[in-house]
Amino acid sequence: MSACTDARTLFAHELGGSPDGVWCAPGRVNLIGEHVDYADGLCLPMALEHCTAVAVRRRADGILRLRSAGFPGTDITVTDIVSHAVPGWAAYVAGVVWAVGPAGFGGADIAVASDVPVGAGLSSSAALECAVALALAELFGRATDDTGRAALASACMRAENDFVGVPTGGMDQQISLRGRAGHAMLLDCRTGTVRHVPFDPAADGLALLVVDTAAPHRLVDGQYAQRRRAVEDAARQLGVDSLRDTDSVAALRDTILSRRARHVVTEIGRVRAAVSALDAGDVRALGPLLDASHRSLRDDFEVSSVELDSAVDAARDAGALGARMVGGGFGGSALALCEAAAVEKISHAVRVAAGRRGLPQPRFWKVAPAAGARRCARP
């Protein structure tokens, strides 16, 4: 069953009756442009077919009843939300309520179901936030055109940064709400503007393979925050508002800051090159850019892991045109651009490499660019 059907079924079983509607939002994979969103950089993500769905019904008693197919249910109050006294996964939902802040919000019943793999670096948290945000916007008469969705994405980012306490940069929420089927989305993280770039690897006999390494996606142990602080410190030492404003990091004397900044500056350049390649219809030209991105993330930014390196190296050795880790790093998933006929061979090689090193057995998905958040069912 789809996540939307699962959410409606869970709602009936756990909360009783029917919801006011069901909404879903996709996870994402970022083709290129990693760890640059919080540096006012450029990213090129795409939405996935994997979605998180929420069945929602308004209440008027100040209670938020949350049920999930994957986590324990909980009941919280609007007062709890105001005081930020919400633990666990419920904080992502409560944070959206806090950030979106619809006038007259008196509580809700929400059932959640998802087929976005948790911990795989495919942005399951943003998918949950964006599904809730779109539901609240439609239920309470907020704008849901592209401008409205951009505002909702910013609210979801605030929810994750300021309510949950995870310092994400906003790319995940933007693509989840604004993605378009058959396109990657060039996101300018400084201005919030987007351009949808046609992207159809299957038309060229290619496939995108996501490899979930089954290693935990560790963003809450402080490493992500450390990298973000380093990027900000480097910009201050260079005398610029952000690393988007420089092409050279030669003036940095601190070796670690220099490497961190070099990744950001060169990665923004790789995004520009990737868009130029897609505009020219040369999808295969993405391969070397993916390889260079992974080297930079591994060596300069130091956010890879043994599981990610194993998957990337094995995919390349088995014939992938290019491969790299995706997401925040320290676990999660890798992405490989492959000849469609070579997907099984490459998947087998990645499995064998993991087994030889005593690593968890990975999971695989062929993915294509899908649509952004949407209403998938009415009462």
Image (cartoon, rainbow, N blue to C red):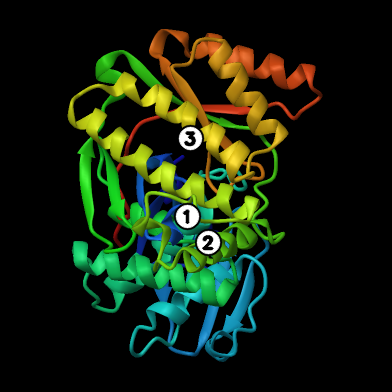
Label 3–label 1 contact, CB within 8 A: no
Tell us which disc is closer to us: 1 or 2: 2
Q: Which residue extends farthest right? A: 358
Q: From what the image shows, is residue 94 above or below residue 61?
A: above
Residue underneath mark 3: 293
Instruction: State the CA–CA distance, disc 3 to disc 1.
Output: 37 Å
The disc label shown at residue 55, or none = none
Q: Is residue 68 visible?
A: yes
Report the Cα–Cα distance between label 1 and label 2. Answer: 45 Å
Badge 3 crowding class, 10 Å Cα cut-off, few under 14, some 14 to 19, many 20 or more, is: many
Estimate the spatial distance between the alpha carbons at disc 3 and disc 2, rounded to whole Å: 20 Å
Report x, y in % for residue 265.
Answer: 42, 48
Q: Label 2 sits on what residue type? A: Ala
Q: What residue sits 54% from the left and 37% below the top?
A: 296
Q: Out of 272 and 74, give the one closest to the viewer.
A: 272
SS at mark 3? helix
Q: Earlier in the sequence, mark 1 or mark 2?
A: 1
Q: Can residue 14 be spotted in the picture?
A: no
What's the residue at 33%, 54% (across, down)? 373
Q: Which residue is mark 1?
A: 7
Q: Which mark is nearer the camera, 3 or 1? A: 3
> At 37% across and 55% down in the image, what residue appears?
246
**Residue 141 percent coordinates (x, y):** 23, 77
- The residue wearing badge 2 is 234
